[in-house]
Amino acid sequence: MEKLRVGIVGVGGIANGKHMPALAKIPEVEMVAFCDLIQERAEEGAKKYGTPDAAVYTDYRDLVARDDIDIVHVCTTNDAHSFVTIDALESGKHVMCEKPMAKNADEARKMVEAAKRTGKKLTIGYQNRYRADAFHLKKLCDEGFFGEIYFAKALAVRRRAVPTWGSFLDEERQGGGPLIDIGTHALDLTLFMMNNYEPVMAVGSTYHKLGKMKNAANAFGPWDPDEFTVEDSAFGFVTFKNGATVILESSWALNTLQIGEAMTVLCGTKAGADMLDGLRINGEEHGRLYTKKVDLSVGGVAFYEGVSHDPSYIEARMWIDAILNDTDVYVKPEEALVVTEILEAIYRSAESGKPYYF
């Protein structure tokens, strides 16, 4: 069997935690090249997941220049997503880029343009779309079960779980804090369910309140206030061309007990749904209100029955299938671009104190 040859650029936490373990389970794939600014990381990745002759690089350009590589997975810091992706596309590779798509909307637009220009496939790593609850909810949305979804909430709120490793607290490299890190997942999930990608206006607020604390209680140990250059919380109010409204809540550190990540709340004319306590559906039937909780413990993904529901594996499997069968990717770059545009609009509104109009 002819195998698709993959190169990994950025062999850090997300590559080790998601991309490489998932790709290793796919028989049609082999990982042949690993690149990281820290050579030891690339060497460790090659040793654990690579072919016996896997190459190691510290300059991504050497990896993407190879004409025997079919696919590149971009797992770098946010500030490198765009140029690594574009160079890989223009070198004839298909690209899976980690979320968020880019540090800002301009860079994301250039990525979409490069994919169209080269004819190569580009997708973004929004793995929450591949969860069992998300598959089921999307099916209901597409069938029109909820009617017109005109109000929604995108929720990504932690009480105290500030990531203190890597470059998460570095605005220059990341482009922002919880909004661009975890808020992006919740927003992607919400827009995908609504199938609504035409924003009109956004109002945003960002806060750097708890980030100034010293020796703060935190799931990952206290952060250094001097290194905490991004917001600790961000909130947005977004309106859309069809009149719909989405409220986005994101935080790494908020004094609240109402927490949850990559969740959506949908309110339609016929029914509603939320992910606040499993997947719950609410509506009206025979003159009575009802609430039901969906049992997601078995089945539910027709084309992967019998496989344990690991979103990271299903993401990788569907990505590779899209390349093998030349079909559409599940996370389209045009959709990811709108997510990035909205995130940027919230940041701009917060900075100016005025609504941002698209």
Image: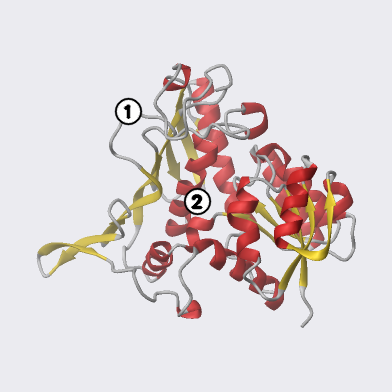
Residues 126 and 13: in front is 13
- On the picture, is 40 further left or further right than 266? right
Residues 254 and 90: in front is 254
Are there few (<14), some (14-19), or many (20+) residues within 10 Å of tag 2? Answer: many
Considering only vertical position in the picture, is 356 above or below 66?
A: above
The quadrant the N terminus occupies is bottom right
Asked where in the image residue 287 lies, by quadrant, the reply is bottom left
Considering only vertical position in the picture, is 142 above or below 235?
A: below
- On the picture, is 111 further left or further right than 156? right
Q: Secondary structure at mark 1?
A: loop
Q: Which residue is mark 1?
A: 255
Image position, residue 94 (x, y; %): 75, 62
Image position, residue 27 (x, y; %): 67, 76
Amino acid, disc 2? Asp
Residues 279 and 86: in front is 279
Q: Residue visible at 34% across and 70% down? A: 297
Badge number at residue 222: none
Q: Residue visible at 49% across and 42% down? A: 182
Q: Which residue is mark 2?
A: 188
Q: Nearer the viewer, mark 1 or mark 2?
A: 1
Q: Is residue 201 visible?
A: yes
Q: Residue visible at 30% across and 50% down? A: 276
Image position, residue 202 (x, y; %): 47, 35
Q: Residue visible at 61% across and 49% down? A: 14
Amino acid, disc 1? Asn
